[in-house]
Image (spheres, helix red, strand yellow):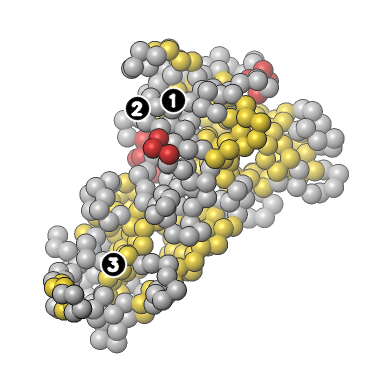
């Protein structure tokens, strides 16, 4: 498939000449849902005071409990010969107050089936009621974890967060509640769970703090309390093949984005990168992950930012509610507008996009190398989206007029 535009640019010291572009589609043929090559000539939108474009990020939502390290669970020797036992363990533990998001993504590389539990302890003097607002779950072959995680992301986006949630349990002071959110995951399968919860003090009706532990076992539930109160938690696979250090807390589960794009005859195509890492991310887009434990599973005196290989800061890439309010201005003689979503510029990664336009249905699309999907042909709309775990980031969002 041909590219959207072929723009020939000749630059001198103080002059530049732009030749007419050639559209990819014949008039009227750019339909919603069509696959299209990313427009390679698009220019990136900048956050600059003198820019005709505007993009601002507002952090919203709830704290996030993220458990994705060890991403792959071992019980015995890893391929490098090192021996590690990561099952029958707490994978991450922290204190959560009021409304919070919990997500857990892990692959079983052991020889036995494993089960996962969210253990919630009430350290308060009064009983605590626990509610669940929405959830998504899926599991499947680790040979293609991206595909298996598609279902959980779509389920979650299709549910309304609401205000109250569904009642789960009343937890007495000093007692615990256990949610078996994923059971009997076979060897070489991946598991993915995300849910929003709310903990409320029964006496005051106010948000209350609970201690949340993400636990994995292959020996049933008899020792869950022991695992939930252990002085150490599972070590990660940090520096074993990959960084494998994504566990901890984020302060915000959502971003509200105001985006104004001005396309011109000289610049008919622009783009933004979504969920890029620091320092390339937009101001306000990222938030650094913080952990109360080190990669060896030892408790820290105070929470610290999680840093991966090459001093890369871990941020809020996955399972963040992203809502973009988009307005596009175009030249009067270029009435056709297309917004495309998919592969980021200069990226060879493939994956999925999950999104909703305005109040429409949730859509999912599998994009290939350098591919995008046409998600809107209007100049003003709201895009709601979420990037699933195991997916390479950033993604690309393109705006084109013709």
Give the residue drawn at x 31%, y 30%: 143
**Image quadrant where one finds the C terminus:** bottom left
Query: Mark on residue 237?
Result: 1
Which percent across, then down, holds residue 123?
77, 32
**Image quadrant where one finds the N terminus:** bottom left
The residue at which mark 3 appears reads as: 43
The reply, left or right, for residue 10 in relation to residue 203 is left
The residue at which mark 2 appears reads as: 241
Q: CA distance from mark 1 to mark 3?
A: 39 Å
Q: Give the SS element for disc 2.
A: loop
Q: CA distance from mark 2 to mark 1?
A: 8 Å
Q: Is residue 129 above or below residue 172?
A: below
Q: Is residue 297 above or below residue 191?
A: above
Q: Are marks 2 and 1 in contact (CB under 8 Å)?
A: yes
Give the residue drawn at x 81%, y 35%: 124
Q: Give the SS element for disc 3.
A: strand
Give the residue drawn at x 61%, y 21%: 232
Q: Are marks 3 and 2 in contact (CB under 8 Å)?
A: no
Give the residue drawn at x 67%, y 40%: 96
Nearer the observer, 192 or 46: 46
The answer to whether residue 358 of the structure is visible from this angle is no
Which percent across, then down, holds residue 388?
42, 45
Q: Earlier in the sequence, mark 1 or mark 3?
A: 3
Which percent across, then down, holds residue 348?
24, 47
Q: Are marks 1 and 3 in contact (CB under 8 Å)?
A: no
* Number of residues whose C-alpha sits closer than 10 Å to that of mark 3, classed few (under 14), some (14–19) or many (20 or more): some
């Amino acid at each position: 498939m041909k590219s959207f535009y072929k723009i020939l640019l000749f630059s001198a010291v103080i002059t530049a000449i732009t030749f007419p572009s050639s559209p990819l589609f014949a008039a009227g043929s750019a339909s919603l849902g069509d696959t299209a090559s990313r427009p390679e000539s698009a220019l990136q939108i900048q956050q600059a005071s003198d820019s005709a474009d505007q993009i601002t990020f507002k952090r919203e939502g709830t704290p996030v409990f993220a458990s994705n390290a060890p991403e792959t669970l071992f019980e015995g020797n890893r391929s490098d010969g090192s021996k590690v036992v990561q099952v029958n363990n707490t994978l991450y533990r922290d204190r959560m107050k009021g409304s919070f998001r919990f997500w857990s993504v892990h692959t079983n590389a052991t020889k036995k089936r494993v089960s996962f539990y969210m253990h919630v302890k009430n350290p308060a003097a009064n009983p605590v009621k626990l509610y669940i607002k929405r959830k998504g779950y899926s599991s499947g072959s680790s040979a293609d974890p991206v595909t298996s995680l598609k279902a959980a992301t779509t389920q979650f986006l299709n549910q309304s967060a609401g205000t109250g949630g569904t009642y789960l349990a009343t937890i007495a002071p000093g007692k615990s509640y256990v949610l078996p959110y994923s059971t009997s995951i076979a060897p070489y399968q991946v598991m993915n769970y995300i849910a929003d919860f709310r903990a409320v003090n029964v006496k005051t009706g106010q948000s209350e703090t609970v201690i949340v532990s993400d636990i994995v076992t292959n020996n049933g539930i008899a020792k869950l309390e022991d695992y939930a109160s252990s002085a150490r938690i599972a070590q990660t696979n940090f520096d074993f093949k990959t960084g494998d250090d994504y566990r901890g807390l984020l302060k915000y589960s959502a971003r509200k984005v105001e985006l104004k794009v001005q396309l011109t005859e000289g610049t008919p195509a622009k783009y933004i990168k979504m969920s890029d890492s620091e320092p390339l991310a937009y101001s306000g887009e990222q938030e650094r992950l913080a952990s109360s434990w080190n990669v060896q599973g030892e408790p820290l005196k105070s929470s610290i930012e999680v840093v991966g290989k090459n001093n890369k800061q871990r941020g809020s890439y996955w399972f963040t509610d992203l809502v973009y309010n988009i307005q596009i201005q175009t030249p009067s003689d270029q009435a056709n507008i297309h917004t495309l979503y998919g592969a980021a510029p200069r990226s060879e990664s493939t994956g999925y996009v999950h999104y909703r336009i305005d109040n429409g249905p949730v859509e999912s699309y599998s994009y290939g190398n350098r591919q995008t999907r046409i998600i809107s042909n209007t100049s003003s709309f709201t895009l709601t989206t979420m990037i699933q775990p195991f997916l390479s980031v950033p993604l690309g969002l393109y705006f084109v007029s013709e």
